[in-house]
Image (cartoon, grey):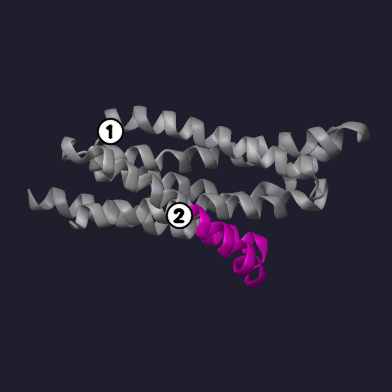
Amino acid sequence: MTLRKTILYSIVLVSGAVVLSLEILASRILQPKFGSSVFVWGSLIAVFMAGLAAGYYLGGHLSDRFTSFIDFGLLLLLSAVLLGGLPVFSTQVCGAIFRALHTDSVERTGPLLASLALFFIPTTALGTVSPFAVRLLADDPSRLGRQVGALYALSTLGSIVGTLGTTFYLILWLQMPLAIFLLGVIQALLAFLALAYGLLGRSAK
């Protein structure tokens, strides 16, 4: 396996873990104001799926226009900033939504509005990773199908690892703000990996 493929596969795998880790941690962000009811989980699942769908679509368009590892690295860096910034204002956003809603509608509407406000944009940014990686990997059309399949399999495997790792370990080891900040740091490291590969490839030309 080439270095290029190894880097892309690794980024997709780890980003897949980050997505589901964020979803688990998101429930802890909403819990103080909105509890952990089926409305909280239904809202989170819907918003994360909508964000990923938007990210897949946007990532496909961006990858046709920006086709370098440096562009990919900058996109990863954006997702890192969006993730790392969540703990700064998440409590205030949840509190403002809780206070703005009528008591009868808080249980149903509150979690959905808070999920949209806090997690839709970061999840969209994370959703752009896989289609962008597909574009960078498309160097051999005869093998494109299996390469795409491998990328999405790795993304799903990462999501499984992120779900179990966060549920059984990360939540127990770290406070919620620090855990989400750690996800941002992980995305930043992936960004620097992509940027370093892109800059080294450019300097070698």
- Identified by mark 1, the residue type is Phe
Left or right of residue 171, residue 40 in this image: right
Tag 2 near tag 1, CB within 8 Å: no
Q: Position of residue 74 (x, y in %)?
A: 35, 44
Residue in view at x 63 percent, y 72 percent:
173
Q: How many marks?
A: 2
Range of residues picked out in magenta? 157-182
Residue in view at x 52 percent, y 49 percent:
19
Left or right of residue 68, residue 48 in this image: right
Q: Position of residue 170 (x, y in %)?
A: 60, 67
Does the segment drawn in magenta span residue 110? no
Residue ranking furthest to the left: 205
What numbered label is drawn on residue 157? 2
Which of the two residues, 75 or 140, is positioned nearer the viewer here?
140
Q: Which quarter of the picture shows residue 136?
A: top left
- Identified by mark 2, the residue type is Leu
Helix or strand or loop: what does disc 1 sit on?
Answer: loop
Q: Answer whether residue 177 is visible to the viewer in this image.
A: yes
What numbered label is drawn on residue 66? 1
Q: Answer whether residue 71 is visible to the viewer in this image.
A: no
Q: Position of residue 171 (x, y in %)?
A: 65, 65
Q: Label 2 vs label 1: CA separation?
A: 27 Å
